[in-house]
Image: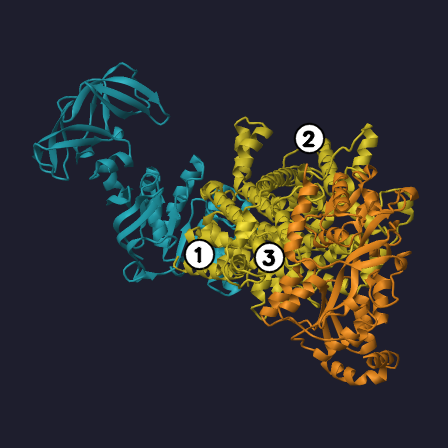
Chain colours: A cyan, B yellow, C orange
């Protein structure tokens, strides 16, 4: 089910000052997709989510879930959260400590006054789905973090909601478990084919899970796009920087070459994608991600985007080296194959594909 | 939500109606000439009340008395709550019952017990200590400010205990553990983590004790007056009782300052705990805190707690029992023991009014506390979770008649109820009790509320539950410790309530405390003590029942049909 | 008048003659008695069972008496048929129109001053005396005059209601002066100052005075002899002096009595010798019915005088005087 948000405003007041948590947000979340709201803390992503579920009242604007207008400040419409038919997983999981796993999961069905038999079979089914068969009688507090997380998911899913919302559900798990759970979640959600809205500040989670990502900053949506689009060819410097590690190089566009443009910078001329058609003569910023830089110890002929520099630092991080290459006054971060035989101080050549670096307006 | 303001509003109406009306009557009374609430306007009562030269000394005494009592009560309550909930001390159940015994004793009886124990002429404890240590003079003179503080502090200990203990029990253990991991000692953890996190509960307890001791009359009259120490409540008494036409309007005029002080305190409290998020400590995890192993200190701590409980609480009760067996007040001696009999008990049990009063008080305790707790849950919800300006008003309202000195508020209720058909019925008592002692329900329940993470409630709403369904299935079960505390505070209070009862009870609606007061006025200490012990027994039964039911409820898996 | 009293005396001996009044009273079924006097339940019960009219006793303490009655009266909800209180309180009630005139024939034989008023009958005196502990005070030390209380041997040994606030005690101290118990006002003042110099312990009212004496915490109390009866077998006795003083107790009928016939009937009953004897025997009250005395040794020989009732203004100003004397350095 599609969610449409129009001109949503939410203001907070702190010590007499107004803070715009949501500053006229317009957003359409397509049906049956995993849609992520990504941004640093305080960007308004959680507020947006809470407005959608109905736990917070916006100060202006409209929210539609499917065909139902659930909030409109103009028409004075407010559908309380319990009438919105949504499911949600909280950061704290919000598992009720006084109940068993069964009671926690059965709760949404009990509020809908389903017959007992039906409740039992549905709970069993959903617990099977999240791989918690046999946990029905356990007190909720006697579960591990990952298990609690799955109980929370089962509870959100059991009533077959039109939309399920996640508020940083993985942030309380340790790194390994987080990765596994992320994969599981991806599997669960793609099997279910429902609209999922996912809030996180973790870019890897966002990239790994989402069909589309909306990056937010200071109460506004900066950019919406598929993970690849945002990663490879973002329209905004903030987004490019936030979604992954990036080298940002200042310079000026010299000329356009189809989709590409030639760009003059402190390290020399670079050819990169110019999706935003920045005109020649304009100041711009080139973004190149460390993992797209190729490395060689000898000169590899006269290709495009080949530069010579000195390896200043080299840190082994397991799956790769992380190196810093100095070209003139510019320091570029790069990822180096762990098998590469180089040491700090070596003179090296770096090159990158014009399709793998892109120009951004300043 | 759009609904919340209307809930807040209707609660403000209900609570306001209950608590504002009597206070308003007193306000009218304080400005009108004559002895009733409606007379021609005058400022004389204020001028007279506030120009007395001894008022300054009285106020100083009052501050020392109330703050001292709050310190004694809160410190003791913290200590007892900590050892009772967080350590593996043996006989904890016993100690937690003992901690709330003073709650069930009529204050006048407890004060008299202490006078018998510690009066400078022949106090039992004084004599014992004098003989043991070969002292020339009395070890401790009860008729002093420290004496008053001791007795009042002990009497208010249960209030503080019942607010602090549930918070201590619901405390998120990971906070303490993380401190210990950081290398902090147990004591350091206690002072740097545990106590600061419990700040709302501790402050609530201390403020409630201050407010309560401000309104207290038994201790200032029984212990203070013989020592010629006057505090606000005895000063009020003094100003109305010299002469036959007691002017309660004038008493109300002086009482207004106590009211203003209490309301100011409540605002201070709200300000100090305004960053509510800091104190949310119960979440899905860490619901059951682990216990601190006292190891080699187990026995010494047990000895200290045991001795403390014995001297401070059990001994006065024993004195009561001793008095109840005697035909008249006597210092323990062979002759005294020889004269012991059950006569006082038999007399009381044969007295139809005493029996009726036991029945009435029991009914009022159970029914009143139950209704009071229901109202308190809604009020606490608004105070803690809605937390708007209006909820601030509601919180202040809930304290309004509570903060008024006891000897005056009863008259306020009389002036109010006489305008209604409830006057002279047991319903007037019931409503008056709930209105006056609402903070006893609201404080512990809102302390418990503060500790329930919003998410637990919000996820219920999203699961399709209405506000009320959420209350019933999620909030209330999680609130059980607080609810039990509130119920106990209210029930035991109602069983021994005096200030309102003495003006509102009529033939047929006699209650225990009034019957006890009558015995006291007639100087019948034996019967008084016998009935007092029956009252303690009655209240203990209620407390034990409530605790057991509460235990069962917390363990019970709520399965809805 | 005399004829009537003989007739009435006859009525109690032969209840059937009494029937006319009783029938109406009985048809009203009950009578509400508001009183500050304590422990009179047995008399009310005796009334109910012997007369067949249910007596309901509402006990209201002196400090709340006026506030309660006047509030109920103003709201039109005064349930009382018969009211009893200290005389000054009754006078205020009379001034406020709460009471109605009634001359009870049972008061015949009471002292003239007790039945002068057309509305309020004085039936007893809340008498005050020096009560001591027989085991703590040697017979030769027992005071024989009020002045003896100023002897330094009583230092820290006396308990009394606070003379700066307890109305009855204030009235009593003033009564000692006005009834010329002392040879001169100077002698009286010397007595008051001497008493103050002995630093008596103050309590709220008479109620808490006997306990410290019984237990031996203090040796002597300015208190009421009735405790010798109600607190028996406590080792209490009263110091014999020539004259005892006390505030008179009054009784009257409410102007808006819901049961007017029963009210009159109850008042008649209350003032009979039998009822008064019960009051004296069971509660140790000093009553004004001729020839009835509480069973306390020596009381029938002592003069017990009513104190002139002081206005509240007088009580306040005397209270302030005594505050200066008793609380002064």
Nearest the viewer among A238 and C317 is C317
Label 2 or label 1, whichever comes before in sequence order:
2
In terms of image quadrants, where is residue C45? Answer: bottom right
Which quarter of the figure is the N terminus of chain C placed in? bottom right
What residue appears at the point 23 percent right and 26 percent down from the top-left corner?
A294
In terms of image quadrants, where is residue A239? Answer: top left
- Whole-percent x and y of residue C68? 64, 64
- SS assignment at label 3: helix
- SS assignment at label 2: helix
- Can you say whether A63 is above or below B88 in the image? below
The residues tagged by marks 3 and 2 sit, at their Cα atoms, a distance apart of: 58 Å
Nearest the viewer among B48 and B366 is B48
What residue appears at the point 84 percent right and 50 percent down from the top-left corner?
B328
- Whole-percent x and y of residue B223? 70, 43
The verdict on a common chain for dots 3 and 2 is: yes
What residue is pinned by disc 3?
A: B248
Crowd class of label 2 (few under 14; some 14 to 19; many from 20; radius 10 Å): few
What residue is pinned by disc 2?
A: B295
């Amino acid at each position: 089910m599609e969610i449409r948000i129009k001109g949503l405003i939410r203001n907070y007041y702190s010590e007499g000052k107004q803070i715009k948590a949501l500053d006229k947000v317009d957003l359409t979340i397509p049906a049956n997709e995993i849609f992520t709201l990504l941004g640093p803390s305080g960007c308004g992503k959680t507020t947006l989510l809470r407005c959608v579920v109905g736990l917070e009242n916006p100060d202006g604007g409209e929210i539609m879930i499917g065909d139902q207008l659930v909030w409109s400040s103009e028409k004075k419409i407010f559908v309380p959260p319990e009438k919105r038919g949504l499911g949600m997983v909280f950061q704290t999981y919000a598992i009720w400590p006084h109940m068993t796993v069964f009671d926690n999961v059965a709760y949404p069905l009990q509020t809908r006054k389903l017959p007992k038999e039906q409740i039992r079979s549905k709970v069993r089914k959903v617990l099977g789905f999240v791989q918690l068969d046999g946990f029905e009688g356990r007190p909720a507090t006697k579960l591990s973090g990952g298990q609690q997380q799955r109980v929370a998911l089962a509870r959100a899913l059991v009533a077959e909601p039109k939309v399920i919302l996640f508020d940083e559900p993985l942030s309380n798990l340790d790194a390994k478990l987080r990765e596994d759970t992320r994969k599981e979640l991806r599997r669960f959600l793609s099997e279910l084919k429902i609209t999922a809205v996912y809030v996180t500040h973790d870019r890897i989670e966002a990239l790994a899970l989402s069909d589309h990502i909306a990056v937010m900053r200071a109460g506004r949506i900066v950019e919406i796009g598929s993970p690849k689009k945002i990663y490879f060819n973002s329209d905004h410097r903030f987004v490019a920087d936030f979604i992954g590690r990036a080298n940002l190089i200042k310079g000026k566009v010299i000329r356009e070459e189809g989709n590409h443009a030639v760009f003059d910078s402190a390290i020399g001329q670079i050819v990169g994608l110019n999706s935003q058609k920045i005109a020649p003569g304009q100041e711009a910023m080139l973004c190149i991600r460390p993992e797209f830089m190729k490395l060689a110890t000898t000169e590899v002929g006269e290709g495009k985007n080949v530069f010579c520099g000195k390896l200043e630092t080299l840190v082994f991080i397991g799956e790769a080296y992380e190196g810093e290459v100095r070209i003139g006054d510019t320091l570029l971060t790069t990822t180096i194959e762990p098998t590469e035989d180089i040491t700090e101080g070596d003179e090296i050549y770096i090159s990158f594909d014009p399709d793998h670096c892109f120009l951004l307006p300043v | 939500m759009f609904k919340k303001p209307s809930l807040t509003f209707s609660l403000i109406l209900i609570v306001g109606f209950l608590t504002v009306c009597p206070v308003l009557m007193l306000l009218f009374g304080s400005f009108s000439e004559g002895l009733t609430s409606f007379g021609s306007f005058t400022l004389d009562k204020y001028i007279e009340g506030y120009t007395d030269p001894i008022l300054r000394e009285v106020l100083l005494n009052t501050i020392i008395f109330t703050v001292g009592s709050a310190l004694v009560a809160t410190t003791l309550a913290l200590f007892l709550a900590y050892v009772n909930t967080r350590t593996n001390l043996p006989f904890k159940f016993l100690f937690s019952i003992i901690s709330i015994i003073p709650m069930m004793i009529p204050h006048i009886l407890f004060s008299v017990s202490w006078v018998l124990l510690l009066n400078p002429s022949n106090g039992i404890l004084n004599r014992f200590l004098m003989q043991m240590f070969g002292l020339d003079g009395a070890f401790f003179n009860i008729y002093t400010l420290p004496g008053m503080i001791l007795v009042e502090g002990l009497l208010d200990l249960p209030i503080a205990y019942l607010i602090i203990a549930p918070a201590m029990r619901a405390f998120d253990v990971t906070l303490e553990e993380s401190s210990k991991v950081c290398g902090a000692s147990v004591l350091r953890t206690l002072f740097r983590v545990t106590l600061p996190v419990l700040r709302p509960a501790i402050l609530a307890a201390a403020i409630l004790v201050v407010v309560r001791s401000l309104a207290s009359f038994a201790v200032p009259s029984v212990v203070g007056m013989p020592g010629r120490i006057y505090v606000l409540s005895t000063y009020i008494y003094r100003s109305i009782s010299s002469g036959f036409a007691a002017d309660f309007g004038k008493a109300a005029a002086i009482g207004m300052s106590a009211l203003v002080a209490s309301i100011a305190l409540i605002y201070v409290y709200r300000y100090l705990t305004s960053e509510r998020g800091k104190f949310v400590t119960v979440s899905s995890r860490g619901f059951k805190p682990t216990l601190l192993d006292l190891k080699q200190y187990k026995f010494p701590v047990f000895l200290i707690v045991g001795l403390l409980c014995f001297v401070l609480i059990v001994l006065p009760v024993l004195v009561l029992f001793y008095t109840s067996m005697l035909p008249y007040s006597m210092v323990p001696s062979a002759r005294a023991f020889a004269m012991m009999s059950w006569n006082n008990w038999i007399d009381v049990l044969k007295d139809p009014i005493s029996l009726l009063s036991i029945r009435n008080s029991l009914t009022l305790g159970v029914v009143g506390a139950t209704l009071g707790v229901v109202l308190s849950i809604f009020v606490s919800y608004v105070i803690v979770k809605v937390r708007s300006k209006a909820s601030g008003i509601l919180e202040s309202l809930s304290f309004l008649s509570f903060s008024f000195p006891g000897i005056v508020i009863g008259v306020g209720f009389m002036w109010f109820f006489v305008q209604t058909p409830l006057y002279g019925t047991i319903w007037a008592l019931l409503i008056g009790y709930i209105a006056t002692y609402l903070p006893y329900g609201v404080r512990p329940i809102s302390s418990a509320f503060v500790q329930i993470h919003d998410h637990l409630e919000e996820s219920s709403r999203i699961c399709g539950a209405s506000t009320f369904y959420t209350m019933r299935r999620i909030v209330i079960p999680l609130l059980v410790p607080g609810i039990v505390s509130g119920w106990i505070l209210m029930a035991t209070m109602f069983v021994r309530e005096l200030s309102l009862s003495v003006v509102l009870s009529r033939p047929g609606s006699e209650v225990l405390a009034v019957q006890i007061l009558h015995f006291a006025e007639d100087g019948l200490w034996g019967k008084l003590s016998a009935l007092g012990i029956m009252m303690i027994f009655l209240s203990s039964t209620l407390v034990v029942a409530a605790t057991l039911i509460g235990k069962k409820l917390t363990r019970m898996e709520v399965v809805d049909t | 008048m005399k004829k009537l009293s003989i007739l009435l005396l006859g009525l109690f001996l032969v209840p059937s003659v009494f029937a006319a009044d009783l029938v109406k009273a009985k048809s009203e079924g009950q009578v509400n008695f508001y009183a500050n006097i304590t422990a009179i339940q047995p008399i009310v019960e005796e009334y109910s069972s012997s007369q067949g009219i249910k007596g309901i006793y509402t006990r209201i303490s002196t400090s709340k008496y006026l506030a309660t009655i006047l509030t109920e009266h103003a709201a039109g909800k005064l349930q009382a048929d018969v009211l009893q209180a200290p005389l000054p309180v009754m006078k205020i009630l009379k001034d406020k129109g709460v009471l109605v005139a009634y001359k009870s024939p049972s008061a015949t034989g009471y002292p003239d001053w007790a039945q002068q008023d057309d509305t309020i009958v004085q039936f007893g005196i809340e008498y005050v005396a020096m009560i001591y502990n027989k085991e703590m005070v040697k017979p030769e030390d027992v005071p024989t005059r009020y002045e003896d209380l100023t002897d330094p041997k009583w230092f820290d040994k006396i308990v009394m209601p606070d003379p700066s606030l307890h109305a009855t005690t204030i009235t009593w101290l003033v009564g000692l002066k006005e009834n010329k118990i002392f040879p001169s006002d100077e002698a009286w003042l010397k007595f008051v100052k001497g008493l103050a110099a002995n630093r008596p312990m103050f309590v709220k009212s008479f109620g808490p005075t006997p306990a410290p004496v019984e237990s031996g915490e203090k040796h002597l109390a300015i208190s009421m002899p009735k405790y010798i009866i109600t607190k028996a077998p406590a080792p209490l006795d009263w110091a014999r002096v020539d004259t005892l003083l006390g505030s008179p107790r009054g009784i009257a009928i409410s102007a808006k009595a819901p049961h007017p016939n029963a009210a009159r009937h109850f008042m008649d009953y209350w003032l009979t010798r039998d009822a008064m004897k019960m009051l004296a025997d069971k509660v140790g009250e000093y009553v004004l019915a001729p020839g009835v005395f509480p069973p306390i040794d020596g009381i029938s020989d002592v003069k017990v005088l009513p104190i002139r009732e002081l206005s509240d203004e007088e009580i306040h100003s005397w209270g302030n005087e005594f505050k200066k004397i008793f609380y002064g350095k």
